[in-house]
Image: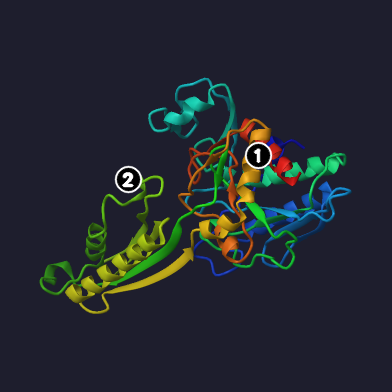
Amino acid sequence: MSVLERFLKYVSFDTKSSEDSTTFPSTDKQLVLGKYLAEELKAIGLQDTVLDENGYVYGFLPASKGRETDPAIGFVAHMDTSPDVSGANVKPQIITYEGGDIELPHAVLTTRNFPYLSDYIGQQLVLTDGSTLLGADDKAGIAEILTACEYLVQHPEVSHRAVAVCITPDEEIGCGADRFPYARFAAKEAYTVDGCELGEIEYENFNAASAVIQITGRNIHPGAAKNKMKNAVLLAADFVNHMPSAETPAHTEGYEGFYHISDISGNESAATIKMIIRDHDMDKFLARKKYVENLVAYLNTRDGDGTYQLTLKDSYFNMKEKILPVMHLIDNAKAAMLSVGVQPKIVPIRGGTDGARLSYEGLPCPNLSTGGMNAHSVHEFVPVQALEKMTQVVIQLTK
């Protein structure tokens, strides 16, 4: 099966995870794809294939003859898609891009909003119909890893190290490494293959935290509200107005951190603000968290003790310090890309992957591109050429 055929099969599964769930994995529909992937790994010829009780899919490919004493290499990807956009009934569109705006049945990719489209002229692109996300984040990574494994099985003359594969659930909600099967995973070093432009290699990511601010108001009939009402909706808006307006995702890039308010809900009596806090630099990250804590304390002093309740939780940390002692992983990735005609580019991740958590748990795990673009969006796409090239990169890394 080609990597494209495999990818198109995977995106037919709705695997959206849920931040509001109390189960693990957060949605049963991830287990449906997980079962399919476990069976596929077994059919390809991997050993010890399993869908475990937590929704992780594992498989192991022994080393080729003469390479049994070489250390195994691991590859990790995630099966869930973002809760932000529907992943149900994905209708892939394959076009040969000839330039200009791309008009989908339910959305338009304009060159004004996406000027880098010109880089893909002449390539085949897989897109959605504009009503859902595509799921290249990270079903492209799964397809590339499994197609590479199938190639190695079908070409026993290719000399390669042992390969450990793990497909995780719930990465999009920050839980992909929570119950990772370390005891089963045979490799001591690995790569996530997860998102971003073809050629990117990432070993620096954000330090990340989530914050939930619960606001308690006092509702009185509007006709008798003077000096009595505390409108929680207005208090929420005031909180937002106290946040640095230029330090948001829309105004930052590269190593610049941000505050991102992702959800506001409520009424006069109670409101909730959900936000994430990100920065590559640890000192700046700590300062950002302190800013939110101080703001809540100030507003409680002004509006009444207990009006604002803050729940602040660290999500993951910058993996850089864990990768610096094993920089051969980065050198090998660059060499693998160059060997198949891909120009490597080291960039910081403006987000996180399972690899950040895994690296802090003792499994160094930088990230490799899949070629997918515009993740978490109805404008998501992946070039067919990128799917094919990254499959070749994975094969080269096993050598």
Q: Mark 2 points at which residue?
A: 251
Give me the residue at 68% from left, 42% from top.
144
* Total labels drawn: 2
Pinpoint residue 332: horizontal percent, then vertical percent: 66, 45
Q: Residues within 10 Å of mark 1 (few under 14, many from 20)?
A: some
Element marked by disc 2? helix
Give me the residue at 44% from left, 61% from top.
208
Which of the two labelled residues, at mark 1 and mark 2, occupies the earlier sequence position? 2
Of residue 355 and residue 159, the one placed in the foreground of this image is 159
Quadrant of residue 390 in the image? top right
Q: Which amino acid does label 1 sit on?
A: Ala
Q: What residue type is labelled 2?
A: His
Q: Which of marks 1 and 2 is in front?
A: 1
Pinpoint residue 203: horizontal percent, then vertical percent: 54, 51
Q: Name the residue under label 1.
A: 335
Label placed on residue 185:
none
Using the rendered image of the protein, determine whether residue 135 is visible from the camera's viewpoint. Answer: no
Of residue 279 and residue 345, the one placed in the foreground of this image is 345
Give me the residue at 45% from left, 25% from top.
101
Of residue 97 and residue 106, the one placed in the foreground of this image is 97
Pinpoint residue 236: horizontal percent, then vertical percent: 26, 63
